[in-house]
Amino acid sequence: MATTSRKHSHPLRTLVILGLVMAGLYTLIAVSGVWTPKLGLDLRGGSTITLTASNSTGTGTVDPASLELARTIIQQRVDGYGVGESEITTSGDKQIIVSVPNVQKDDLLRLVGKTAQLYFRKVYSAEAAESATTPTTTATPAPSATVSSRPSASVSAAPSPSTTGSTNKRPLPSLPTPVPSPRPTIPSGTTTPLAELLKWTPSDRDNTDFTNFKCGDPFPNVSDQALITCDESKTYKYLLGPALIPGNMVTRAQAAVPQNSVAYVVELQFNSQGGADFQTVTAHLASQTSPQNQFGIVLDGVVISAPSVGSEYSAGIAGGKAEISGSFTQKSATDLANVLSYGALPLSFEVSSVENVSAKLGGDQLQAGIIAGLIGLALVLAYSILYYRGLALVVSLSLVIAGLLTWALIVLLGQSLGLALNLPGIAGAIVAIGVTADSFIIYFERIRDEVRDGRSLRTAIETGWIRSRKTILAADSVSLLSALVLFVLAIGSVKGFAFTLGLTTLIDIAVVFFFTKPLMTLLGRTKFFGEGHRFSGFEKEHMGTSTPPLHSSQRRGALAVGGEA
Amino acid sequence: MTDNQNLDVLEPSTEPVKKAGIAHRLYTGEISYDFVGKRNRWYLISGIVILISLAALGFRGINWGIEFTGGADFQAPAQVTATTIDDVRSAVAALNIAGDDLSVTTIGDNTVRVQTKTITTDTEVTAVKAAIATAVGVAPESVAYSLIGASWGQQISTQALIALAVFLALVMIFIWVYFREFKMSIAAIVALLHDLVITIGIYALIGFSVTPATMIGVLTILGYSLYDTVVVFDKIRENTHEITNSRLTYSVAANNAVNQTLVRSLNTTIIGVLPVAALLFTGWFILGTGPLKDLGLALFVGMIAGAYSSVFIASPLLAQMREADPDMVEHRERLARRAARATEKSVHKPKVKPVTVALGGEAATTTVVDPGTLGLVSAKELDAEAARRQRSKQTRSQRRK
């Protein structure tokens, strides 16, 4: 065997290359240090929430950019909620899927599903936050931004005097207040005229709470009530009046560099109602002193920006257009524009499904999946031993190779693409055992056909391969096609099924071409298989070549025509 | 010598392994089942099964899971006792959330399941979870639940239908391109729809609830059923490659192909069904519910229907359609003329006689085609006489061109 010619080195070389590829894959796994696939939440417990966006105007489709923006905002919310490892992805053209492992909190659903609240509020007081973690920083604070009228050539680029360090000059009530009644958590429902809202002043309780407030303390975010909160970086805390303009009156917001300027600004456009309100509000704010000449742009209870209105706009900023300037970078301007656009997002979300799997149920499902896989594998092997005798060795080795490849790829894809193996995914892999073994059967049966046609076994292994590989490719293409269609069009967890089915079909092709076929060529040269030894699966009786088939062919012709008559 | 061989046929030798022999004899045509010729019988059988399926669908309807109707499903670990269901039911009913629409079942002896179609908000979920947890004595965290919005099912169904349509269209194109024969596409699609209707019908009959996993299972069947069909069609194409130059009609060649791939179809189906059976088994008996069971059942039924349809529906239908083509009509007429000549010849050539005599019952029809010249047997296996006639057939067909 070792002395064989070039022709013989070919199958060995293929096997060696395959071995190297597999070694490479497992080296990658060893380097990453993770040996098990990333498990889906249905296998390790956790919550999966599927939100479906619809265009709130009632017609039209969901804009991908809007969906992505909504996803970012939900991500921020979930991150702010303090659960690790959360994953928020968009799926299809209108779904957002929130997956949070190991969390059994029902209010997560409320948090994720609620509509984002963007409001323009009036800043009453602003103070450096007493946060233990963040000492006073010199970073440009949000309050340094200014609002100006958009068409105005005189862009107030110079930041208004910063409120840094400004303290609440109002004397604080020294009396200890009795245990206060809880603050309202839902709006009263009555609409107060804008003029009234502008006259709002904080109650004593608001002032006390503001003084004692530390960033991170809970405070109900209710549109018609005062709000005490911090900015995103938790460097400032604000006492804000009731909402003056809701974010959904913003029709457009974008980051831009105006002509004759080098600095980024955020351009803002309101609808007609918003434009009118904006003019009223800016006229009022322009007459105030810092910090009460500031807007608080509040998203989900967090001050995103608090631009001041210069005193030159005593008539208000008309025309529904404004720009916020300050020391923006491109990124910070874009971020703010995105947040402002959220008010303009024509999306409303509906909770489509919530899947909450306890850790125990997840473990049970994983175990059941593994058991099903083992039973399936054992049955397939048992059947191939029964029917193919020695060839079962080829079947089992090929299945082992296919299994190792599948494992490696699922682990690696889990690492690189964040692809998680869920229960339908396991089902797909189990179904694939059959699909993979089917390819071997097509090949083996074809070899037998060739032998029946009078070829020697060694020739049959080659000619049978040439004929069967077309069939295998055609049949696998169909499998692949169905997996692909399912993957592209399926919603939710069944995507995992389509994915593993497609992946394993590809692996099947690789294994048949680069493992089973070369192995058969090698085995064909051994005495045991090549000479059709008993139990090799190629024994003469098994193939039926022991009887000269002339008479039978005559008989077949007779029968076939008989059937037709 | 010929006499001895004929004796072999009549009295099968005891030497060959029985099981292996069948495969071989199927291949050589020693045993040949008439799948194509008796097509009306298969059509009738399938027709009846489809009627039953449609009736089940019409009368019993499909038991849609909550994924399609909207609602909530809770599962809690519990030591199931005789009173578990009542305990849980009264605990949840006391909340006055679900009203009458409350289904409490147990899965195995360690899980209790509560389903209701009226719960929609998270606060209700929290309350129901707490009630169930108290009733069975576990922490609320160990109660798993899923909550489905009302429009979710609509979305899934729409997507599934789109996937179905896209898949069928792609498959038609694929088969058309691969086999260069549009009639194969039609036959394959008819077989697919056949499998689809039967699977859905059986679902309706058994009353299993249909979940998204079921849908995905059903869509996967399409791929799998086609797998078998492609294997059989591949052989039919091979056998009918130069059909107009052969002495076989399309139907006979197709029937031979089905017989030759029968063992292969059987084996691929068995091997394909075995893991699915494992899936169904664990899904049913270990988990009691969930995607494994739903996928498993849909695939199990669909794969068997798929194997049946590729042999009994797709191939006969293809043969039937091809035989109606002008070139096949012409081919059959040519064969008939040739057969007439052969009959005349055989009168003067008594040498063929022993074969027909030995075969007894089939004698009347054997004379129609000269059996020694069938193209599927390698020349080596033919005796000199047959080889000679094979050559003469070749020249004649070339002359015909």
Image (cartoon, rainbow, N blue to C red):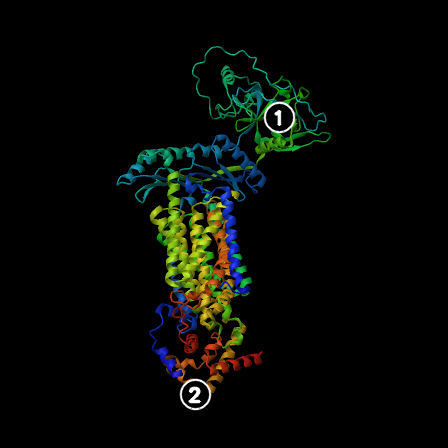
Classify mark 2: residues with Cα within 10 Å, few (<14), some (14-19) or many (20+): few
Question: Between marks 2 and 1, how big is the CA–CA gap?
Answer: 111 Å
Q: Nearer the viewer, residue A199 or B223?
A: B223
Q: Position of residue A388 (x, y in %)?
A: 40, 63
In the rendered image, the residue lying farthest to the front is A3
At 33% across and 74% down in the image, what residue appears?
A: B14
The amino acid beneath tag 1 is Phe
At 37% across and 59% down in the image, what residue appears?
A: A383
Query: Vertically, is A15 above or below B256?
Result: above
Q: Disc 1 marks which residue?
A: A278
Q: Nearer the viewer, residue A529 or B382?
A: A529
State whether residue B351 appears in this view: yes
Are both tags, 2 and 1, on one chain?
Answer: no
Comparing marks 2 and 1, which lies closer to the viewer?
A: 2
Q: Position of residue A157 (x, y in %)?
A: 69, 25
Q: Quadrant location of residue B326?
A: bottom right
Disc 1: host chain: A
Q: Nearer the viewer, residue A66 or B19?
A: B19
Say whether marks 2 and 1 touch (CB < 8 Å). no
The amino acid beneath tag 2 is Pro
Q: Position of residue A522 (x, y in %)?
A: 48, 62
Q: Position of residue A46 (x, y in %)?
A: 43, 38
Query: Vertically, is B244 above or below A461?
Result: below
SS at circle 1:
helix
In the rendered image, the residue lying farthest to the right is A260
State whether residue B63 appears in this view: no
Q: Disc 2 marks which residue?
A: B350
* Labels in figure, total: 2
Q: Quadrant location of residue A343?
A: top right
